[in-house]
Amino acid sequence: MKVDFLYSVLTDTSDTGTGIAGFNWNILIEYAVYIFIIVIGLLVLALIKRKSRLPSHTELRDLMGKLGEKLRTLIAYCESSSKPAEGQNGGSKVEKLTKLLYDSDKLYYQLSLSAEKEKDVDLQTAAQYIGEARKLLQSYKFIKPDKEDLKKLNQALESINLSMRCMDNILERDVDLKKQKQKG
């Protein structure tokens, strides 16, 4: 009985849209839809904000360490196997290098944005070192690195190590600033 009444009130097609005691159910439903749309919009904005958050200095240092480790792995792989296995056609070297290029591009972008946001010269220096490494890696984009030609890969590794030293200095500075803030 109650369900039939509710159904008749909700599906009432009269022009006034009023139910018992002049209560306007159409407006209530309309406002409920508006509230639902607003809540969904706020959730989407929160998700966008979370995804576009820049990494902290510690996270950037960890990303640099991972990039350096991947490059060391690639160099060791290139040194150990001068010729690809049968049917492999050097594909794994190219795949590793492509992934390494993608990671270096992403790290360079994040470092540049962080440096611009914080107006930090040390972060900009670290970004420049990663940019150097990126350029050195791009020279292998269309050729497979072999055992004899690892000079640029080693230079890229050195650039990544220099950027890691810059980030270590930044992290030390952050610790000092935190101590000063706690004292004062």
Image (tube, rainbow, N blue to C red):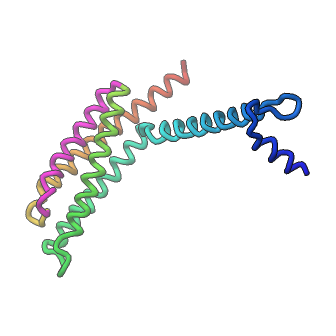
Residue at 42% over, 37% down: 54
Residue sitting farthest toward the bottom: 86
Residue 38 located left or right of residue 24: left
Task: Give the mark count.
Answer: 0
Above or below, 39 relative to 155: above
**For this rendering, which residue is in front, 163 or 141?**
141
**For this rendering, which residue is in front, 51 or 113?**
51
Residue sitting farthest toward the top: 184
Above or below, 70 relative to 88: above
- Tell me where residue 183 appears, x and y as whole percent: 55, 21
In this view of the protein, can residue 56 be seen by the observer?
A: no
Residue 184 located left or right of residue 121: right
- For the C terminus, give its image quadrant: top right
Residue at 14% over, 56% down: 140
**For this rendering, which residue is in front, 163 or 95?**
95
Start-end of magenta stretch? 119-144
On whether residue 124 falls in the magenta region, the answer is yes
Residue at 80% over, 32% down: 18
- Tell me where residue 64 appears, x and y as whole percent: 33, 47
- Tell me where residue 118 appears, x and y as whole percent: 37, 26
What is the chief secondary structure element of the magenta stretch? Answer: helix
Residue at 76% over, 33% down: 17
